[in-house]
Image: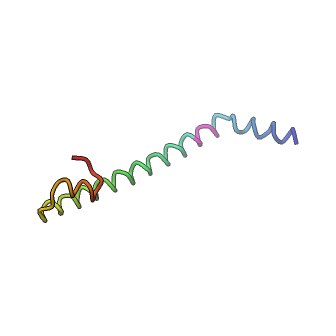
Amino acid sequence: MNEAITAYHSVAASPELQELERMRTKAQHDEAQALHNAEKKKAKEIAKKLLRKKMTVEEIIDITGLTR
């Protein structure tokens, strides 16, 4: 069992594996950021429509979660 643990630690410490983990983490971050940006863009589109419908800025902020 100790040999298996030692082997795991040596593989986990390899620069190649560390780079793969860094790339995976970056990809997850990039995906989350893209989703956040898409949601914000959609909220802005909705806010513009609500402004055209003569809703107040306060109501739009409440509905969309956007800031002034």
> Residue at the location (33% across, 55% down)?
38
6 or 51, nearer to the observer: 51
> Which residue is located at x 44 percent, y 47 percent?
30
Q: Nearer the viewer, residue 59 or 18?
A: 59
Question: What residue is shown at x 70% (from left), y 38% (from top)?
Answer: 12
Q: Is residue 47 left or right of residue 4?
A: left
Q: Is residue 49 above or below residue 24?
A: below
Q: Is residue 53 left or right of residue 10?
A: left
Colour scheme of this structure image? rainbow
Q: Residue at x 38, y 51 (%)?
A: 34
Quadrant into which the N terminus falls: top right
Pinpoint residue 33: horizontal percent, then vertical percent.
40, 48
Q: Nearer the viewer, residue 47 or 45?
A: 47
In the image, which residues are magenta?
17-21
x, y percent for residue 32: 44, 50
Q: Main secondary structure of the magenta part?
A: helix
